[in-house]
Structures are given as structure tokens and as C-alpha cells.
């Protein structure tokens, strides 16, 4: 039997959504909470937030929305006609975790592709291009990528550029789900403009990176902006008190709080991955390239940790092994990580190791 494994700091590794809001965001909200302000984004703070996003990314237009699912659905709505389809990774949030929102609201078919590591490639995309020109088939039009992916991997710039070139040659548009875009930039060490240039439309995540709840849609291809305001309103994403969404963006972008937050989360994930990947019976299921550590371990070990440490069991296999997802956030500390590592290290020696 494994003993009790306590969690001295109480930090959750279950999701970057479990973290609170960053003080800079709360301060920006408090500063925005003065006097009366025109509604629906026709205010100085909202114009400032949009200008900051456009200047950081090179976008023609930036629209704020309430959450990541809405960013994906609204962003995709700018790219698709009713008979067109979206090629996406089988593991994508769009395909798995949005309750069929895109299928219901846009009516668009998702062409999901199995991938080894959450990433699409030109070859994988090409496999879903059959039936183009056939009136009986939904027509592939958009390639949807997540950066970071849902299994914590990060597309390199050459990988993204290869996909972009392939898409241009094949009449496909690109949408990037950037719920963890800041973590990807911290990993790649490149400016947002480089990454954004690989998409026609992308989302810019705030909520997982220190906001209370806001995401942006960045429209890179100017011609797509014409209908964007109407689409956002019809999809119920136009906030009447827009200044409070905008304040969160300004709080994150000023002084590069968003990048510092992502760097901290990534550094803590790196610390965790480095420490546990060398332990007997523990190995990384996917490369650690952001703020998520996917570790394969014995189910008995995961069960012993779970009463005290919050994390998701990502998948379990019949051989007593499982993959757990350990997420870090902007406020994860070295003490949080070291406590979890200590608990795993202490218990790992009690677990019978699989024959190699
Ligand atoms: C890759 C990805 N995209 C989008 C989202 C946003 O989803 P939500 O609608 O919960 O904000 C998430 C949240 O977990 C995510 O992991």
C-alpha cells in the first residue's frame, strides 16, 4: 500500500484555469471601474486594448470575446462557408472539448486527423483533402492548429511555415487556437508577429495566463475583417461593458505581464519535467514544450497522489499504467513544484516497476 502523500502548498496542477487572476489584471480592472463609459467597446480603453493587440501581432483587427470556445467558433466563422470543413487534430479542444460547438453553431464538419503528438503536418493535412470538388463531400477549407497543442507540444516556426506554405498552395486557410499562445511564444522565444504571420485568424488566450476571463481574436487577413463585428455580435460575444474585457488585456500587455506570466509557468513545467522524468517508472509521454507535463506512471502512484494533488489522468491503459497531465500556471512556484516532485520521488520507489 502506498502511504498518504500530502500537498503542503495546496497548489493545483489540474489546469492553468485553476489559477486566480494576476494582480496587474485586477489593478487594471479597478482602474477601469470609474465613472460612466460608453458601452459595446466604443471607449478609449477598448480602443487601446485593440491597438495594443494589433501592434503586438500585426493583426488588421482584434476582437475581444468571453472565452476560448467562443474565440474558436467566432474565429472560424470568419473563414467558412456553410458547406466547408475544418481539418483539425483528433485531440484538438475544438474536436474533443467544446461539446460540438462548431458543429452546432457553424454547422461545419470537422475532419479530425490522428496525430502522434497533437501536431498536424502537411502530410497529415493532405490525407484529408480527398473529395475536393465533389459536390457530395464537405469541402476542406480551414486547417485548425492549436499552439500549444492539447498535449503540451509546440509547433516550431519552420513547422508552422511549412503548414502555411502547404495551405497557400492548396487553397486552405489557417486558424490557430492560441489559448496558450503566450506559453508557445515563451517556448519559441520569438515575437508574436512571427507566429501570427502563419495564420489567417488566431485566438490570443488571456484566461489561462492571468486574466479573469477574456480571449482575443486576431484577424491577420484584412479582407476577413469586414464581417467580423457582425459575426461577433450574432454569436453573442459582444460585451456591453466591454471596458472590463479590455482592461484585462491592457493589464496583461502592459509591461509584458503576459510574457512574464508564460515564462514563469513554462519554467515551472520545465523544472517539474526535468525532475520527474529521471525517476524510475516515470517518463514523459510527450515532449514538454510549454506549461504542461504529460507523464506516464503507474496507476497506483497516480491514485496515491490524487487525493492531495489535483491533476487529470489523461489516459489509462490496461497494463496498470496511465498518463497524467500536470499543468503549471503563472503563479506556480518552485516550492509547489518541489513539493510535488518530492511526493512522487518518495512514492515511486514503492511501486513495482514495469519490466523493460
Ligand atoms: C487548447 C484550448 N483551446 C481552447 C480552450 C478554451 O476553452 P474555454 O471555452 O473553456 O475557455 C481551452 C481550454 O481548456 C484549451 O485548452
Image (spheres, rainbow, N blue to C red):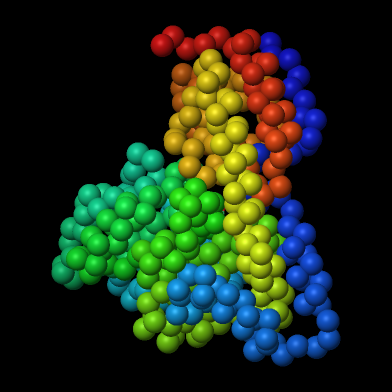
Percent of width and height locating residue 34:
83, 81
Q: Residue at x 49, y 48 (%)?
A: 187
**Is 193 situated left or right of 18 in this image?**
left
What residue is rendered at 66% in x and 60% in y? 257
| Quadrant occupied by the C terminus | top left
The answer, for residue 164, to whether it is visible in the render is: yes
**Above or below, comparing residue 160 to residue 221 in the picture:** above
Q: Specify whether 8 is left or right of 175.
A: right
Residue 22 % position (x, y):
73, 57
Q: Is residue 322 above or below residue 174?
A: above
Left or right: where does residue 143 sit relative to residue 3? left
Which quadrant would residue 267 be assigned to in this image?
top right
- Residue 195, compared with residue 315, is above or below; it is below
Q: Is residue 316 visible?
A: no
Which residue occupies the foreground of this view, 271 or 151?
A: 271
Depth check, front residue: 179 or 131: 179
Q: Taking 278 as reference, is 247 above or below it?
A: below
Closer-to-camera residue (243/275)? 275
Please report the residue visible at 33 percent of the width from the left and 44 percent of the height from the top.
114
Q: Nearer the viewer, residue 136 or 73?
A: 73
Q: Measuring from the top left, give residue 202's x and y in whole percent.
A: 45, 66
Image location (x, y in percent) of residue 91: 42, 47
Q: Please tell me which residue is depicted at 21% across the width and 54% down the height of the picture.
A: 126
Amino acid at each position: 500500500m502506498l502511504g498518504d502523500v500530502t500537498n503542503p502548498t495546496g497548489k493545483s496542477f489540474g489546469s492553468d484555469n485553476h489559477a486566480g487572476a494576476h494582480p496587474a489584471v485586477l489593478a487594471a480592472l479597478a482602474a477601469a471601474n470609474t465613472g460612466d463609459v460608453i458601452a459595446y467597446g466604443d471607449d478609449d480603453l477598448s480602443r487601446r486594448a485593440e491597438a495594443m493587440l494589433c501592434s503586438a501581432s500585426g493583426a488588421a483587427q482584434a476582437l475581444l470575446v468571453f472565452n476560448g470556445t467562443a474565440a474558436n467558433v467566432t474565429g472560424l466563422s470568419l473563414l467558412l462557408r456553410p458547406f466547408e470543413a475544418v481539418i483539425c487534430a483528433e485531440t484538438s479542444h475544438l474536436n474533443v472539448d467544446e461539446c460540438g460547438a462548431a458543429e452546432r453553431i457553424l454547422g461545419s464538419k470537422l475532419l479530425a486527423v490522428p496525430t502522434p503528438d497533437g501536431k498536424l503536418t502537411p502530410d497529415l493535412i493532405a490525407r484529408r483533402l480527398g473529395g475536393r470538388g465533389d459536390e457530395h463531400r464537405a469541402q476542406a477549407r480551414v486547417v485548425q492548429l492549436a499552439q500549444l497543442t492539447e498535449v503540451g507540444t509546440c509547433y516550431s516556426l519552420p513547422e508552422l511555415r511549412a503548414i502555411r506554405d502547404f495551405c497557400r498552395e492548396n487553397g486552405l486557410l489557417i486558424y490557430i487556437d492560441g489559448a496558450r499562445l503566450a506559453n508557445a511564444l515563451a517556448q519559441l522565444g520569438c515575437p508574436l508577429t512571427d507566429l501570427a504571420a502563419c495564420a489567417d485568424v488566431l485566438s490570443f488566450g488571456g484566461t489561462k495566463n492571468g486574466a479573469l476571463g477574456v480571449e482575443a481574436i486576431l484577424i491577420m487577413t484584412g479582407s476577413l475583417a469586414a464581417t467580423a463585428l457582425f459575426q461577433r455580435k450574432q454569436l453573442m460575444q459582444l460585451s456591453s461593458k466591454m471596458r472590463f474585457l479590455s482592461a484585462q488585456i491592457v493589464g496583461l500587455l502592459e509591461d509584458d505581464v503576459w510574457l512574464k506570466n508564460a515564462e514563469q509557468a513554462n519554467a515551472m513545467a520545465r523544472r517539474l519535467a526535468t525532475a520527474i522524468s529521471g525517476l524510475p517508472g516515470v517518463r514523459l509521454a510527450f515532449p514538454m514544450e510549454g506549461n504542461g507535463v504529460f507523464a506516464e506512471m503507474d496507476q497506483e502512484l497516480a491514485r496515491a497522489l490524487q487525493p492531495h494533488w489535483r491533476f487529470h489522468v489523461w489516459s489509462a491503459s490496461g497494463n496498470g499504467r496511465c498518463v497524467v497531465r500536470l499543468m503549471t500556471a503563472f503563479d506556480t512556484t518552485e516550492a509547489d513544484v518541489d513539493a510535488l516532485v518530492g511526493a512522487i520521488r518518495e512514492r515511486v520507489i514503492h511501486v513495482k516497476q514495469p519490466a523493460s
